[in-house]
């Protein structure tokens, strides 16, 4: 099921990339992703930088599905508490070649999972164990996470200053909230 959802998301992202000129705003266009241009960089350099960025966010709970012009990075997280809860952020990155470099398009989705404990069935012999309750996939629309991603890409590709989560949380350019995709339970290492 997760593979089918990922494939569907990839197709939606790929369909939107053809219409994504420059850095786009959020809102209804978010379903297509937010784009950023990287002059003088190849699509391969851009994808490699994105993979490195995600590995700096966290060493654990991160998985990649890649293809020649894109990737999905899934970053799982757990919330501590009496109930077992957590979820994942999926970063859908596609890259295309432009006249003067590369254009990357990012779409972030979130899936939350929770398990409110085990309820014993009346007939345990016929009970099939099921997955935790899962909420549907939702788009992350907070602009701070997208801005932080593209600023970090500029750091990796051009040597611009790296912005750590603790700095971004207090910087009005990132909105102070909505940084969970890159900052929740993150190692937050710099290059």
Image: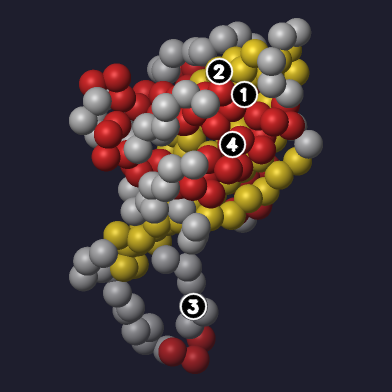
Which mark sits nearer the N-terminus, 3 or 1?
A: 1
Residue extending furthest toward the bottom: 125
Q: Are marks 4 and 2 in contact (CB under 8 Å)?
A: no
- Badge 4 marks a residue whose secondary structure is helix
Quadrant where the N terminus sits is: bottom right
The relative height of residue 61 versus residue 54 in the rendered view (above or below) is below
N-terminal label among 4 and 1: 4
Residue designated by label 1: 104
Where disc 2 sits, the SS reads strand
Nearer the observer: mark 3 or 1; the answer is: 1
Q: Position of residue 17 (x, y in %)?
A: 65, 20
Which residue carries the number 2 mark? 36
Residue annotated with mark 4: 50
Residue found 48% across the figure and 35% down from its top: 108
Confirm or deny contact between disc 2 and disc 1 (CB under 8 A). Answer: yes
Question: Of callouts 4 and 3, which one flags the residue occurring earlier in the amino acid sequence?
Answer: 4
The image quarter in which residue 86 lies: bottom left
User: Which colouring convention does the figure follow?
Assistant: secondary structure
- Pointers 4 and 1 in contact (CB under 8 A)? yes
């Amino acid at each position: 099921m997760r593979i089918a959802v990922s494939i569907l998301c990839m197709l939606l992202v790929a369909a939107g990339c053809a219409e994504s000129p420059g850095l786009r705003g959020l809102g209804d266009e978010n379903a297509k992703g937010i784009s950023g241009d990287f002059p003088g960089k190849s699509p391969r350099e851009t994808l490699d930088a994105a993979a490195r960025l995600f590995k700096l966010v966290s060493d654990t709970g991160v998985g990649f599905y890649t293809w020649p012009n894109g990737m999905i990075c899934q970053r799982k997280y757990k919330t501590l508490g009496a109930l077992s809860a957590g979820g994942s952020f999926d970063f859908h990155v596609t890259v295309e070649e432009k006249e003067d470099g590369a254009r990357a398009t990012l779409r972030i989705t979130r899936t939350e999972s929770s398990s409110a404990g085990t309820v014993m069935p009346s007939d345990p012999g016929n009970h099939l164990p099921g997955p935790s309750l899962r909420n549907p996939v939702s788009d992350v629309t907070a602009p701070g996470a997208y801005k932080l991603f593209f600023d970090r890409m500029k750091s990796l590709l051009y040597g611009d200053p790296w912005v750590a989560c603790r700095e971004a949380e207090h910087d009005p350019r990132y909105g102070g909230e909505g940084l969970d995709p890159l900052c929740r339970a993150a190692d937050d290492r710099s290059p």
